[in-house]
Amino acid sequence: MNYKKILMSLALVLALTSCQVQDDIKQQQGAEVKETTETNTDLKKYNTVIYQYFDTVTDFLVYAKDEEEFEKYKEILEKDLKKYHQLFNTYNNFEGVNNVKTINENAGKEPVKVDPAIIELMEYSKYIYDITDGKINMALGNLLGLWHEYREAGLDNPKNAKIPSAEELEKAASNKDINKIEIDKENNTVFIADPNLQIDIGALGKGYAIKKIAEDLKDAGLSHGILSVGGDDVIIGENPAKKNGLWRIAIQNPNMDEENPYSSIIDLKNTTVVTSGDYQRFYKVDGKVYHHIIDPDTNYPSKYFKSVSVVHPDIALADALSTYLFIVDLDTGKKVAEEFDAEVLWIDHDDNVYKTEGYENLEVKSED
């Protein structure tokens, strides 16, 4: 990464984590936690921000009896973040770790022995493939990787930014048979039988990791807090500082230059919320924006929506659904949301806003 890119990354981090004086707002990508000053607890509030994992910002807010308890949770969080960041990584190698990149490097060569967490992720990825009609397909690594390469090159050198040719995209998308990814649960191995196929778990790896991390935190005793990793938020239990137990979450406005930074404010407890948007990772070619969420039916960035937010108790499913609902039309999305009992907010490119009935019931009607 060059110096200019480092500065851009730091600027993004600062923008995502800067505080604003409005009822103690803690900035996060995709969503924000808004807390009023009403106090109804003897517990103390603690917060930490971690920058080095999953190429994003992790914000951890906890209510605990004392700092020692908070430090226990923080230690678990940092250990798990490092673990899953390394295991689920498709771009970097780590000493002594067989990860997704290791599996890709051995495509067509030999099975790779991996941590059981990767086996679980591979099996879950196949489940997500089935329930999304193949649109969320971890076997599309070549296609997604091609767009990633062009995006990185365009960010490094905006004047010469380009998009892949139709021929390049067609070739990259030609090897995508998920059944060529062979999972041996008994021996903890994964083998890509097609030497020209690559795995990409970007649409669900982070959400699945967060689910496992949240489970570890709850098992350790955490009962009041929010774990936010790059806009994927797990709301753990009730808000002890509010009589109604609700946490107030502000969904980021996808129109970043507008005065109002929020597209919606909702009250939640003991659930999760994930936002997928075209404003998070993108580059421009001839003034046109090309974001990172690719529609496998066209091989190009999806054109249906600017932003899709999903509320669901399962963070792994919410993460996958937010991407899936971003690349399918509204009617299909509404049926899927109903099928999985997900509450959803859609914002299209004409700034039209659509909501499930349940989502409307979550929205804050007035600032109290």
Image (tube, rainbow, N blue to C red):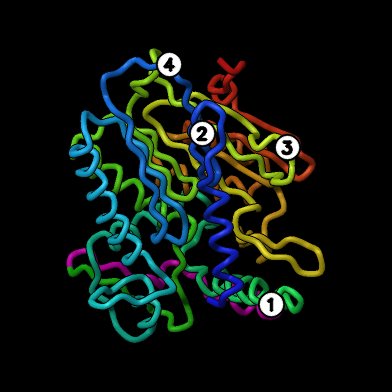
Q: Residue at x 41, y 45 (%)?
A: 59
How far separated are the C-alphas under marks 3 and 4? 27 Å
- Within the image, what quadrant is residue 216 found in? top left
**Is tag 4's residue or tag 2's residue first in the polypeptide sequence?**
2
Residue 357, numbered circle: none
Q: Secondary structure at mark 4?
A: loop
Task: Please give the range of residues in magenta.
Answer: 167-186
How far separated are the C-alphas under marks 2 and 3? 16 Å
Q: Is residue 123 above or below residue 100?
A: above
**Is tag 1's residue or tag 4's residue first in the polypeptide sequence?**
4
Task: Give neighbour class at mark 1: few <14, some 14-19, many 20+ (Cα, 10 Å).
Answer: few
Is residue 40 visible from the viewing direction of this image? yes
Depth check, mark 1 against mark 4: the one in front is: 4
Q: Residue at x 39, y 60 (%)?
A: 53
Q: Secondary structure at mark 3?
A: loop
Residue 214 in picture, x, y percent from top left:
30, 43
**Magenta segment includes 324:** no
Q: Quadrant of the C terminus?
A: top right
How far separated are the C-alphas under marks 1 and 2? 35 Å
Residue extending farthest right:
286
In this orientation, which residue lies closer to the viewer: 355 or 186? 355
Amino acid type of disc 3? Glu
Amino acid type of disc 4? Glu
**Is tag 3's residue or tag 1's residue first in the polypeptide sequence?**
1
Which residue was labeled with disc 1?
157
As drawn, is 19 to the left or to the right of 83? right
Residue 25, numbered circle: 2
Which residue was labeled with disc 4?
38
As drawn, is 293 to the left or to the right of 180? right
Amino acid type of disc 2? Ile
